[in-house]
Image (cartoon, rainbow, N blue to C red):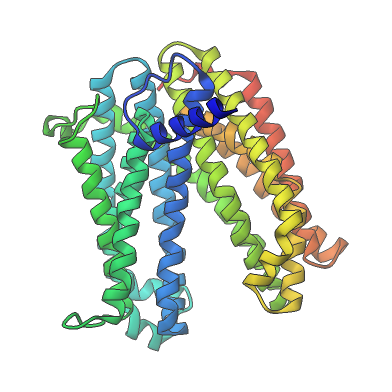
Amino acid sequence: MGFKIRRFFSLFQQALAGGEHNYTEGSIRKAVFLLAIPMIMEMIMESVFAVVDIFFVGRLGNEAVATVGLTESVLSLVYSVAIGITMAATALVARRVGEKNFVEAAHVGMQTILFAVVLSIIISIAGILSASHILHLMGGSDKMIADNIYYTKIMFGGNIVIMLTFIINGIFRGAGDASIAMRSLWIANACNIVLCPLLIYGLGPIPGLGLKGAAIATTTGRGIGVLYQLYRLFIHRGFLHFGAAQLKPQPELLKQIIKIGSTGTVQFLVGSASWIFLARLMAGFHEAAMAGYQVAIRLLIFFLLPAWGLTNAAATLTGQNLGAGKPDRAEQSVWTTTGYSIIYMLVVTCVVFLFGKPVVNFMNTDEQARRYALQALQIVSTGYVFFGIEMAMMNAFNGAGDTRTPTIVNLVCFWLVQIPLAWVLSQHIFKEPKGVFIAIIISQFLSALMSWYLFKQGKWKTVKV
């Protein structure tokens, strides 16, 4: 037992330290562990940004919080694009690394960065010029817009750091060094935590900038994280060597990046849109139901983040092993990752039923809201295993460069099943929010089943990228 504990902590330290590893040979379980630990930490760090910002902005009043919410709603489109391009970067880099073609892997990475920079400049110009119109369109009042317009302009103007954070981290994950992605977000979060209160409220000679300070702090924090990423790309280099000569556009490669990335973006948007519709259904009930639902969703996402980080390992292992001409090892890597994900999800389900009530009570004081939050948690968590299976399979498809299959699965399960089923169950059968929660686990079961079936078919093994 003592040896196993020492070995666990040794591997844990190795995972955090990172470095170059050959994930196409050796123990698959060790490979999953070394990749998953920093990816889990990365996902947790990404969520900290939103929590820190809202914590400090909340003291500025409801208008400031509303501005952040409206701006973030529109910025979610930028996040979607960034995630889509990241899928392309991870898949293509992992495939080239698996082939031991490190020169081409670096070339893919640089071309992806080039495309992201050009796209973010276009978004910046459009966002700055249209900031007022965007907030009006989202329902912002004239006073709120006049007082807080600079927050929206700064966030859109600095969207390049959001784009590059996602995409460069995707490159590192594809190359198999997820610890760099993790550390870049550690640095960015540390800077944001220090800068947010300093720039919002001021200190000594530093004036308080209010909500504008929050935007500057977040953008600066992410920017410093990006500088660390660029340092690791261009100065403290690993086996991927980046240089200015790779900036020359390659039309065929850019087409491939756009093809994979655009489908990945749609894949993410399809899932996001379904959750927005469910929130709209919940809003049709009383405020306590909506409040309870929001508490439950935040807790559900909190528990899902580590699983998402864990199953991200499937994307890297699939891409690299397919590149190495080892499809069977790629498949075994996905099954191993799925097994770990199922174990984690079963543990979380037990935690929800054992400790869900005190956690919900801590987060909300309204008895009705607490009841709906606990109901949502307990019903949805019974299908957590299906979330785990689906995430592993989806990441495997994306890692193989097959972003089309998960998009189709999402369209069928979320738009053709979840949305209409949630409406029928909540409005006509149960006539209460419980119908929405049941629709979620039914559609999630179907999504896991479809993903498992399509993965078993093995067509993802033949995708050329």
Left or right side of 178 for 1 = right
Residue at the limit of the structure toward the left, as seen here: 245
Left or right side of 334 for 40 = left
Q: Nearer the viewer, residue 295 or 5?
A: 5
Residue 173 x, y percent position in the rendering: 38, 34
Residue at the limit of the structure toward the front, as seen here: 2
Residue at the limit of the structure toward the bottom, as seen here: 143
Q: Nearer the viewer, residue 425 or 390?
A: 390
Residue 52 x, y percent position in the rendering: 42, 66
Left or right side of 125 for 144 = right
Residue at the limit of the structure toward the top, as seen here: 325
Q: Which residue is pictured at 28% across the width and 62% down the height? A: 219
Within the image, what quadrant is residue 443 found in? top right
Res 353 seen here: yes
Q: Which residue is pictured at 20% across the width and 31% down the height? A: 237
Res 422 seen here: no
Quarter of the image with the C terminus in it: top left
Residue 38 x, y percent position in the rendering: 43, 39
Q: Nearer the viewer, residue 194 or 371?
A: 194
Q: Which residue is pictured at 43% across the width and 42% down the height? A: 84
Residue 348 x, y percent position in the rendering: 67, 47
